[in-house]
Image (cartoon, coloured by chain):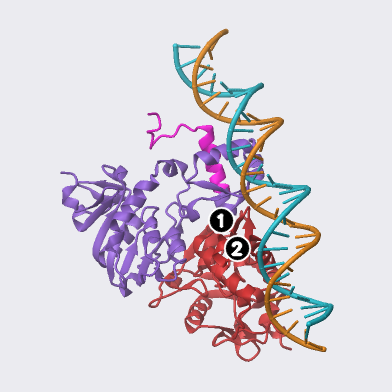
Chain colours: A purple, B red, C cyan, D orange
DNA sequence: GCGGGTGTGATAGGAAATTAACAAAAAAGA
DNA sequence: TCTTTTTTGTTAATTTCCTATCACACCCGC
């Protein structure tokens, strides 16, 4: 299986085209096939083929190319990441922890594409307060009239589509969080849950500190991975949700 | 002028349909004509006609209905408001104050659809720090790699698509604003610039307090109007930008 | 009840987009 | 170098969308 490369990326013309296309579409919000073809200097047919092979990244909408899936991943520009992302697994993990949602509760939703799927699983008649700091999450939550949305502001970071506080942020202190749904770039037995940047870790820790319960939502491909910034030992999570369902952290890693 | 009703609204079948359609599209982000037709229980042809008459609200994109103008006004759900909005005037007002932008500056962009057009007028090679608290502004600014975006967080308010702080917000205090581009619901000689809610006024005042210069960006239809919350006398603005260009506040209202 | 107007539905023509199939070109491997 | 495989371009056929036109139903004023 030659598609098992998650680190080095030996170019590949297709991938380069998709990357450029994705950036152009993200910027313009929609691009006509014809324009895309001459931008990439290939035939219209090739553009169609490229997009069909990455249907979960870009999509056709009547001759125009748009971001797929309500642009819920407008954030992860990198197609290497985009390609290895397993959306079904992430959705399944979210489905596993959706039953934890209770009406009138306040929940924290972490950044990334994983917990974003949780928004779709909130019943349309369940009143809920959602606290987030990622733009893709906010974008989705805003469409739900039954959700009271609270956003933590700060400086925008493109790769995570999130805002990071410039000082200490007092917003979180105004809320008591019933359940924090956290994502992670890596999950390992000793190092616990890790993410890529330290300021991201700081926000995560702040949220978990104010949460009654924390749930880690990851697909199993994150197991054994380690990223630069550790933000919580596994003991701090009441449950870990994966595509295989909810499990207490002790039962993982033997 | 029978379109001067901003409170009572005597139904109108078309208007009711558009309202429902707009809500459905805002929620689903895109809706096929066929689905829309059976949702409204009218013919496909009627849906097309409805949308063509309100092209600045909803738009066709190859058989699918999407929010017009990149969803930059995802906020103002109310079609009565949406109908009276004059986009060209607002764009012209923004064009008038675009020359005030300087590289490396920090600017504040107020909420609403008016100053949103200013984002489109920022040259793609001009590095700029933009501070905002409205989701539609953030949505647009994020697409520009040359913009450093700062967002003020808080509780989301649907009608203005903005976030209002839960406590005092320390974020603004970390920045020095070169120019604040403000919007208003009304502009009147004695009462100055007014907006609809008091918490909106509070944010506006806080921003202007930290700004070297403030510019009021409005179309002339706002002149003589008065809303509930006054946030600044006209003297506090260095310039007022309308579709007729930039003018000092003294020259208006004789 | 009788026109005039408006709003709505149905049909057909043309334009555009999507698909499929095949040929040419490029890349990879032996 | 030659073959094999992959990738790309072209063309044609099919489907889909868009527009225009006409016909019918409804509402109002007279």
- Local crowd at mark 1 within 10 Å, few (<14), some, or many (≥20)? many
Q: Nearer the viewer, residue D7 or B221?
A: D7
State the image quarter where residue A129 is shown: bottom left
SS at mark 2 in the image: helix
Give the residue displayed 47% in from the left and 46% down from the top.
Answer: A56
**What kind of element bears circle 1?**
loop
Q: Which residue is mark 1?
A: B144
Q: Which mark is residue B119?
A: 2
Quarter of the rendering containing residue A226: top left
* Image quadrant occupied by the N terminus of chain A: top left
Task: Tell me, yes or no, whether the two marked residues, 2 and 1, touch with CB atoms within 8 Å.
Answer: yes
Residue D28 appears left or right of A93? right
How many numbered circles does the render carry? 2
Q: Earlier in the sequence, mark 2 or mark 1?
A: 2
Residue B49 shows in the view: yes
**Mark 1 belongs to chain:** B
Residue drawn at 69 percent across, 82 percent down: B3
């Amino acid at each position: 299986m030659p598609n098992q490369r998650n680190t080095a990326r030996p170019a590949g013309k297709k991938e380069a085209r998709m990357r450029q296309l994705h950036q152009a579409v993200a910027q313009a919000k929609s691009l006509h096939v014809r324009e895309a073809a001459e931008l990439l200097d290939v035939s219209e047919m090739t553009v169609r083929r490229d997009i069909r092979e990455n249907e979960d990244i870009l999509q056709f909408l009547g001759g125009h190319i748009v971001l797929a899936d309500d642009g819920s991943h407008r954030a992860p520009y990198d197609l290497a990441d985009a390609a290895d992302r397993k959306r079904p697994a992430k959705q399944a993990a979210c489905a596993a922890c959706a039953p934890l949602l209770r009406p009138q509760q306040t929940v924290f939703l972490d950044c990334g594409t994983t917990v974003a799927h949780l928004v779709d699983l909130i019943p349309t008649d369940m009143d809920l307060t959602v606290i987030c700091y990622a733009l893709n999450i906010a974008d989705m939550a805003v469409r739900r009239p039954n959700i009271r949305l609270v956003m933590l502001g700060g400086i925008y970071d493109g790769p995570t589509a999130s805002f990071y506080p410039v000082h200490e942020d007092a917003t979180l202190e105004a809320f008591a969080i019933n359940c924090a749904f956290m994502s992670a770039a890596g999950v390992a037995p000793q190092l616990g849950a890790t993410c890529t940047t330290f300021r991201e870790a700081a926000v995560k820790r702040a949220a978990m500190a104010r949460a009654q319960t924390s749930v880690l939502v990851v697909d199993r491909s994150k197991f054994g991975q380690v990223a630069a910034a550790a933000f919580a030992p596994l003991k701090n999570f009441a449950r870990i949700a994966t595509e295989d369902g909810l499990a207490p952290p002790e039962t993982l890693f033997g």
